[in-house]
């Protein structure tokens, strides 16, 4: 007998919540700014998963794109330009127990991916489409933003991405000139 659909979401909601809290604690306890930034990315991804589970798909996507993507890239560029990270501080996993814990977490995440992949072939494992309302999944917010962005405003979108790429290359060039001279 398959588990109740509510149980599926409840377990994963608490799992992502605990992972977000653990990642936040790891973020504030790191001495290396690079390690702290990577733990902050983990917090952002877990929060995005929580948003998606609550039915706020657009906010979850923006969380990944804007915060975990763009903002964290800016943080890492600042760390690289200021030379705050040192090679000996990059690894937070020290000793065999840390490696075993990391391996266990990796295996647990792989098991979850495998269960979600099996839902295509085993409909009994398929979660409901919308846990909040129980009806069909409504992607209206994503569709309302994505359709004009990639049809009417595609040129502006692509020009903005080229402008941001030029700004990143310029920042790296300026940062290298100061370091070389």
Image: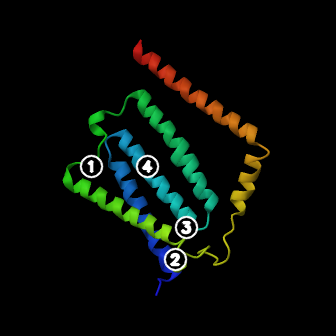
Residue 93 image label:
1
Q: Are marks 1 and 2 in contact (CB under 8 Å)?
A: no
Mark 1 vs mark 2: give the one in front: 2
Tell me the quadrant of the picture where the C terminus can be found: top left
Q: Residues within 10 Å of mark 3 (few under 14, many from 20)?
A: some
Residue at the location (43% across, 53% down)?
42
Instruction: Report how far apart the C-alphas of labels 2 and 4 lie in the structure.
Output: 35 Å
Q: Earlier in the sequence, mark 3 or mark 2?
A: 3
Which residue is labeled 2 in the image?
122
Which residue is labeled 4 in the image?
40
Q: Are marks 3 and 2 in contact (CB under 8 Å)?
A: no
Q: Earlier in the sequence, mark 2 or mark 4?
A: 4
Which residue is labeled 3 in the image?
53
Instruction: Report how far apart the C-alphas of labels 1 and 2 lie in the structure.
Output: 38 Å
Left or right: 179 with respect to 87?
right
Q: Residues within 10 Å of mark 2 (few under 14, many from 20)?
A: few
In terms of secondary structure, where does tag 2 sit? loop
Instruction: Report how far apart the C-alphas of labels 1 and 3 lie in the structure.
Output: 30 Å
Mark 3 vs mark 4: give the one in front: 3
- Residue 134, located in which quarter of the rendered image? bottom right
């Amino acid at each position: 007998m398959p588990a109740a659909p509510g149980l599926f979401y409840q377990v994963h909601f608490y799992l992502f919540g605990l992972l977000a809290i653990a990642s936040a604690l790891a973020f504030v306890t790191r001495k290396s700014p690079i390690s702290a930034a990577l733990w902050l990315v983990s917090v952002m991804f877990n929060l995005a998963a929580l948003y998606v589970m609550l039915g706020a798909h657009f906010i979850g996507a923006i969380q990944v794109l804007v915060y975990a993507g763009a903002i964290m890239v800016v943080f890492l560029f600042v760390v690289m330009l200021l030379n705050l990270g040192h090679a000996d501080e990059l690894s937070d996993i020290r000793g065999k127990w840390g490696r075993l814990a990391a391996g266990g977490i990796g295996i647990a995440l792989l098991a979850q991916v495998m269960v979600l992949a099996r839902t295509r072939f085993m409909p009994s494992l398929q979660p409901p489409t919308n846990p909040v309302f129980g009806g069909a999944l409504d992607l209206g917010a994503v569709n309302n933003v994505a359709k004009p962005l990639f049809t009417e405003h595609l040129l502006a979108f692509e020009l903005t991405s080229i402008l941001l790429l030029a700004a990143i290359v310029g920042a790296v060039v300026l940062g290298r000139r100061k370091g070389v001279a």
